[in-house]
Amino acid sequence: AQSVTQLDSQVPVFEEAPVELRCNYSSSVSVYLFWYVQYPNQGLQLLLKYLSGSTLVESINGFEAEFNKSQTSFHLRKPSVHISDTAEYFCAVSEVGSGYNKLIFGAGTRLAVHP
Amino acid sequence: EPEVTQTPSHQVTQMGQEVILRCVPISNHLYFYWYRQILGQKVEFLVSFYNNEISEKSEIFDDQFSVERPDGSNFTLKIRSTKLEDSAMYFCASSLGQQETQYFGPGTRLLVL
């Protein structure tokens, strides 16, 4: 069985500062890794994903995450945050080769960007 | 851009009542999912659905729950006799293929009194 741990429930940061949201996973098999974002009163939106290949993946709005197999981590980073990045961020995994792509989520990290 | 929609956005019901939560997945998607998030807890997988049958379900998805695709566009989650602990945000998702990105709806917030 897989599990996902997001070490920080809340991360306050000032605008234009860098941020890292941490995600560690546990699994006995290979996994795909995802970051979803939930803006207030909206559904979950895929931010970025790692399926294979380069361990560094990027989103269109400046976020990036790096898959580290030895540390079983998939931390999310952004070098300079904006007020509009305020949201809840969820790390998730799904088992490679599983039939139906069930997602296992972490508890979420609430990013609060202050002016 | 196509999106998953869910209705209602909020529902309040009495314990023991039946509720039906509705979802319209993205039109060409073939795989459908329900997840839920109890307040303050993780988003949890409930069930996946493909080719008009359940393909996988979690231990949460007991006999009180059922899913259906009654027509070519809707995907529903029914809870037959709601309990207080069913109070949660319920998310529907759909994907084009097995290992494809899941697109989530905005959720239905269910409150059981």
Image (spheres, rainbow, N blue to C red):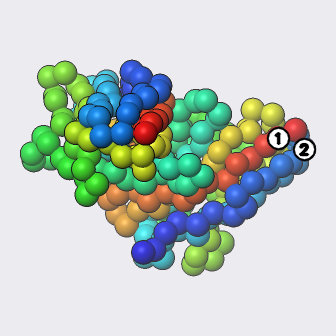
Gap in angstroms between the C-alphas marked 1 and 2: 6 Å
Identify the image quadrant of the N terminus of chain A.
Answer: top left
Residue at screen point 24% across, 50% down: A62
As helix, strand or loop, the secondary structure at mark 1 comes to: strand
Can you identify the residue that label 2 sits on? B14
**In the image, are marks 1 and 2 on the same chain?**
yes
**In the shown orientation, is residue A3 left or right of residue A76?**
right
Q: Residue A73: which quarter of the image?
A: top left
Identify the image quadrant of the C terminus of chain A.
Answer: top left
Can you identify the residue that label 1 sits on? B112
B83 versus A1 height, above or below? below
Tell which subunit mark 1 falls on: B
Residue extending furthest toward the left? A54
Q: Residue B24: which quarter of the image?
A: bottom right
Please state the horizontal and vertical placement of residue A86, each as a whole percent of the image.
Answer: 45, 43
Find out whether the residues at labels 1 and 2 contact each other: C-beta distance under 8 Å.
yes
Tell which subunit mark 2 falls on: B
> In terms of sequence position, does the residue under pointer 1 or pointer 2 come before the other?
2
What amino acid type should be assigned to the residue bearing mark 1? Answer: Val
Please state the horizontal and vertical placement of residue B81, each as a whole percent of the image.
Answer: 83, 44
